[in-house]
Amino acid sequence: MRLVLTNCNLIDSVSPTPVAEASVVIENGRISEILDGNRSPDTRDAQVIDLEGRYLLPGLWDVHIHPEYSSPAVPSVPEQTARFGRNLMEGLTESGVVGVRTGGAANFMDVAWKRTFASGQLAGPQVFASGHFLTTTGGHFLTSGHARECDGPYGFVQAIREQMKNGVDHIKLNLSGGIMGPSWDRHHHTFLLEEELEAAFEICRQRDFKVMAHATNPDAVKTAARLGAHTVEHGYIMDEESIQTLLEHDTWYVPTLAISHLTPEQADTDLEKGWVERRAMAPDLIRRADAASGEHKTWFQTALNAGVKMALGSDIIPLRESALLEMGLWVKDGATPWQALQAATKNAAELCGAGDENGTVEAGKIADLMVVVQNPLDNIQNLQNPLLVLKDGRIVADRR
């Protein structure tokens, strides 16, 4: 049956000006027609929903996520896998997150959920899977449970081939340390040797697999871009040459502001304060995040103003809050609500290679949509608690 959504303010993620009194016609999971207020849709043999002036826009994407980290509270692989699936499904139905890209997931649980959702057995977001993230012995965030330690050129090549064999979409390489880790895991340190980097990137080029590069300092950022990384994640510390290198190589930047910005001292909205309280981060990690946040903000702003390609990834859980939290931080750090929304829709889908099918509200595209009461371009927090969420043209959440 055709579905016709009428009388909405349409934010299509193509133009920053909403289309008033618009109608969107959906057939076979795709948008077949979009009409402005001067034309009326054909409603014969259709389910019609009058949106009463509410705002219709593309569903959101989060292009840097992980399952929960290993802990005594999540003791087994089956339980961790199940909890990851619940997180993904709740992200879709509670917050309209229709697409995700993982940056490290143990036991290929992201591949499993990708296949489950793609089969139509359960409603969940489109998943682009990485499998484990690859780092050195003594590398980044080993306590997460999602790392695979590799050493030497052929150690990385073997691990990458194993990831490919198990059905991943891209390869996650951790070139450097981070904020969240033990004392020897620092974001200003680069971990891989030159020969390890060259071998890892060469096998990915040879097999046409994109590299998602965890790069947190100028050396790692520039190396990743020059070797052909599809995306650079984090970029806590950069320099002007880093920005130029990203531009020259047409490399995507995913800033993950949440990692350095969501601390008790910095949280100022109810959503942020609630998340920080539940997170209960260790004092040492709070100090490290607070110390990094100012420089992180500076290089985020520099990249945004320079025109670096950027998309939204949070690197936090749960998915029902992650994208909205990260979008709020983009706006707090100087992005407009329109820039934040594009980063979480059009840009994110394009980063994942899905821009022809997803990320905007245009005729011919898949009907992954959400409806909110108030205009998110006035206040990005208006994206909270969507009234309707559609995945592949099917209503998966209805709170009218």
Image: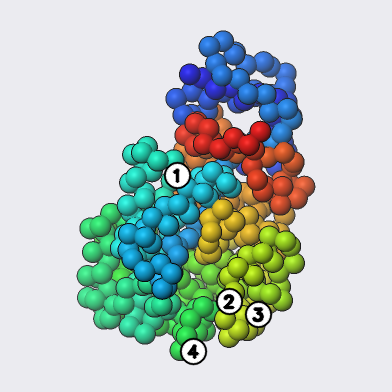
Q: Quadrant of the C terminus?
A: top right
Say if 260 sits above or below 349 in the image. below
Q: Which mark is residue 290?
A: 3
Say if 15 sits above or below 223 in the image. above
Q: Quick check: marks 4 and 3 in contact, CB under 8 Å?
A: no
Left or right of residue 284: residue 333: right
Q: Which residue is mark 1?
A: 124
User: Going from the N terminus, do you reach mark 4 or mark 2 first?
Assistant: 4
Say if 66 sits above or below 143 in the image. above
On the question of residue 67 being in view, the answer is yes
- Residue 99 location (% of width, % of height): 48, 48
Near mark 2 (Cα within 10 A), the count class, few <14, some 14-19 or many ≥20, is some
Left or right of residue 47: residue 37: right
Query: What's the CA distance linking mark 1 and mark 3?
Result: 34 Å
Q: Which mark is residue 183?
A: 4
Q: Which residue is mark 2?
A: 281
- Residue 139 location (% of width, % of height): 39, 81
Identity, as a three-letter code, of the amino acid under mark 2: Met
Query: What's the CA distance linking mark 3 and mark 2?
Result: 12 Å
Identity, as a three-letter code, of the amino acid under mark 4: Ser
User: Going from the N terminus, do you reach mark 1 or mark 3 first?
Assistant: 1
Q: Quick check: marks 1 and 4 in contact, CB under 8 Å?
A: no
Query: What's the CA distance linking mark 4 and mark 3?
Result: 16 Å
